[in-house]
Image (cartoon, rainbow, N blue to C red):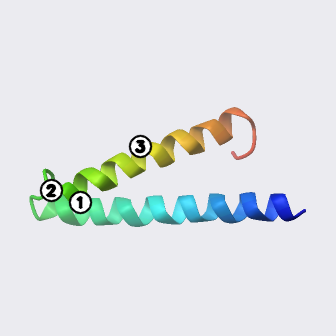
Amino acid sequence: MERLAAFELMLSDIKKQSEYEKEQMEKLKFEGKEKSATYRQYFGNRMLYKMILEKYKEYGLID
């Protein structure tokens, strides 16, 4: 059961962080800072989160 709890916590953290970075990217974009290092880092992170979540879906772990 400990393993399942760790998975659920990780999944929740990934979703929260992805949403937070999406909001930050929108703010940076509004400020015209799409080429900033921060924006690009958030973009790279969000691509990683998307890949992880797609794998979870592929294996039927999430909807």
- Closer to the chain start, of discs 3 and 2, is 2
Q: Which residue is mark 1?
A: 38
Left or right of residue 26: residue 29: left
Left or right of residue 44: residue 57: right
Report the front residue among 27 and 52. Answer: 52
Cα gap from disc 3 to disc 2, whole angstroms: 17 Å
Disc 1: CA contacts within 10 A as few (<14), some (14-19) or many (>=20): some
Q: Position of residue 42 (x, y in %)?
A: 32, 55
Please tell me whether mark 3 sits on a helix, a strand or a loop. helix
**Looking at the image, is 8 positioned above or below residue 46?**
below
| Amino acid at pointer 2 | Ser
Cα gap from disc 1 to disc 2, whole angstroms: 5 Å
Q: Position of residue 28 (x, y in %)?
A: 19, 63
Q: Please report the residue visible at 69 percent of the width from the left and 45 percent of the height from the top.
A: 63
| Amino acid at pointer 3 | Met
Report the front residue among 29 and 10. Answer: 10
Cα gap from disc 1 to disc 3, whole angstroms: 14 Å
Q: Please report the residue visible at 58 percent of the width from the left and 65 percent of the height from the top.
A: 13
Q: Are marks 1 and 2 in contact (CB under 8 Å)?
A: yes
Q: Which residue is mark 2?
A: 36
Please tell me whether mark 2 sits on a helix, a strand or a loop. loop
Residue 47 tag number = 3
- Closer to the chain start, of discs 1 and 3, is 1
Please tell me whether mark 1 sits on a helix, a strand or a loop. helix
**Looking at the image, is 1 positioned above or below residue 34?**
below
